[in-house]
Amino acid sequence: MPLSTLVTHPVTNTRKIAWISAAVGFTFFLLFITITLSITFQKRAQSHDQLAWRTQYTILSLFSEMKTLLEPLNALTPGPCQPVNSELTSRAAFANNVRAILLVRNGVAYCSSATGAFSLAVSTFTPLTDLDKDLDLTLIAGTPRVPERPALVLWLKRPGSDRSGVMTTLNIDLAPWLLLASQQQELKGMALVVGDNALASWNPQLISTAELPKKSLRTLTLPGYPLTFHLYGNTLPRRDIHTILLAGLLLAVLVSSSSFVLLTLRQRPGKEILLGIKRGEFHVEYQPLIEAATGESCGLEALMRWTHPTEGNIPPDAFISYAEAQNLIIPLTHHLFQLVARDAHQLRQMVPAGTKMGINISPNHLTSASFRDDVSNWINAMPADHFSYVFEITERTMVSERNASEIFDWIHQQGIKIAIDDFGTGHSALIYLEKFTFDYLKIDRGFVQSIGMETVTSPVLDAVLTLAKKLNLCTVAEGVETDEQASWLLKRGVTHMQGYLFGRPMTVSQLIAYFQTRQTALS
C-alpha cells in the first residue's frame, strides 16, 4: 500500500520508486565494481611484486653460491688438470644445477669436472662470453655433451690474469617458478634474458629477445649481473573482470529489489496504520516488571505490536516513528488505550491489585489538546482500583516542550507515576532532574549490555545509578538477560528490572500462563 501521497497518484509514485531503486542499484554497481576492481588490482600487483622479489632473491642466492664455489678454484688455473680434476668433480657433484666446471687458461678450457683434461677454445662453444670481464653471463643453446638443452654460462676471471679463470655451465630449470606462478592463473609465462638471447617458459629452446612479448608485467634486473627476468600476463585477466561484473550485476539487482521493497514498505504505514486499526491487526504484548529485591513481578509494560496480513510482523520502531512523523501517533495511542483497557479486565484475575501498568507516551500526544481527556477516558475504562499507572516519557519531551512542568504536574495529580525512558541516550541534562519531579529512571538496555565489559558506557552507567540514589529515584534496568547482569544491578541498588531473564513480551494468554506457572512454583 502506498503512502498518503500515493493515494492520489499511485502509478506515478510507483514508477518514481522504481526509478529511484534502479538509480540506487546502478550507483551500487558502479561503486562495487570500482572498489572491487581496485582492490583486486592492488592484490594482484602485490602478489606479482612478491613473486618478482622472491625470484630475484632466489637467482641472486644461486649466483652467490656459485661464486663461493668457484672463486677458490681460480688459484688452480696456473697448474695442470690431473692434480685438481678430482676437486672439480667433487665440487660439481655437490652443487645444484651445475652441468660442468671448467678451468680456462689463455682463452682455452683445459680441464673439466665432467671429462677431465681436454683442450677446447672457449669461443667455440660460448662465443659471446667476454673473457676480459671479471664476471660475465651468457645463455647458450647447449653444451658439447648436452647440445639439445640450453645452459647458462657463468665466467669468473682470475684476478690479474689474461683470459684465465673458472667457468661453469648451469642447467636453467624454470619449473620451480612455473609451479609458483601456477597459483596465479593470470600469469602466462616468464623469461630469462642475457644480452640478445632469452630462455622462455613456453619454449624449451633458446630464442631471440625480439621474439619476446613487447610488454611484461614485471621486469627485474640482478644487481651485479647482466641478467634480466620478465613476468608476462595480465594484472586483471578477463576471467576476474567478468566475475566481478557478474557479481556486481547480481548484487545491484538485489540492492535495487531491496530498495524497491523497503521504499514501498516505508510508504505503506500512512494508510495502513489506520486500516490496521480498523482491521484489528494491532495487539498488545506485556513484559513483566520485576522488583529487584524480591524477584517478584510488580508491573507490566504495555508494548504495541502490529501483525500485517501480508507483510507479517512490522517492527515497532518502524511504525511508531512513522506514525509520529505522519501525525498518526494520537489515533494509534487511542487504540493502545482501548486494547490495554480490554486486556486489563482479563488480567485482573491473575495479577494482584496495585500492579503497575506502564505505557509509553509520545511527546506529540503529550502536548496535544486531547491528551487529558484521552487519559481520563482510559482510566475510567480500566478496572477500578486495581492497577496503578506509569507513563514512560523520553528525554526529548523535556527538551522540546516549554510547558512540560505543567503537564507533568497534571499527570501526578491523576495518581500516575512518571518514568524517564532510556535516560542517558538522548539529550541528557541534570537540570531536568532538578527542575521536574519524576518517579522512575529507566536505564537503557545498551548500558545493561555493557555490564562485565570495559566499554565507554560503563562509567556512564555508574554515574546514572549514583545520581538516581542521590535523587531518591526508583531505577528500572531494561534488557536484563543474564544472572550476572541482574546480580551486578542489584548490588548497585537498582530497584526494578525488566528483560528476557524474567520474561519476554507476552500476549494476554501467554501472560496468564506465565503468572499461573509462577503461582504454581510458589505454592
Image (spheres, rainbow, N blue to C red):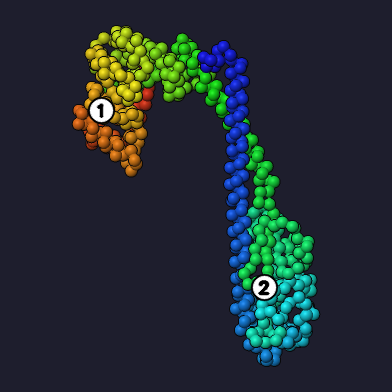
- Residue at 55% in and 12% down: 7
On the image, the x and y values in percent for residue 240 come to 66, 45
The disc, 1 or 2, on the residue closer to the chain's N-terminal end is: 2
State if disc 2 and disc 1 touch (CB < 8 Å).
no
Secondary structure beneath dot 1 equals: helix
| Image coords of residue 457 (percent x, y) | 33, 38
Q: Residue 480 sits in which quadrant?
A: top left
Query: Residue at point 61% right, 25% down?
Result: 19
Dot label at residue 510: none
Q: Evaluate whether residue 439 shows in this view.
A: no
Indicate the quadrant containing the N terminus: top left, top right, bottom left or bottom right: top right
* Disc 1/disc 2 C-alpha distance (Å): 85 Å
Say few, some or many: other residues with alpha carbon within 10 Å of mark 2 (under 14 / 14 to 19 / 20 or more): some
Is residue 332 or residue 352 the one in the foreground? 332
Could you say which disc has been placed on residue 97 in the image?
A: 2
Q: Which residue is mark 1?
A: 431
Q: Residue at x 60, y 55 (%)?
A: 47
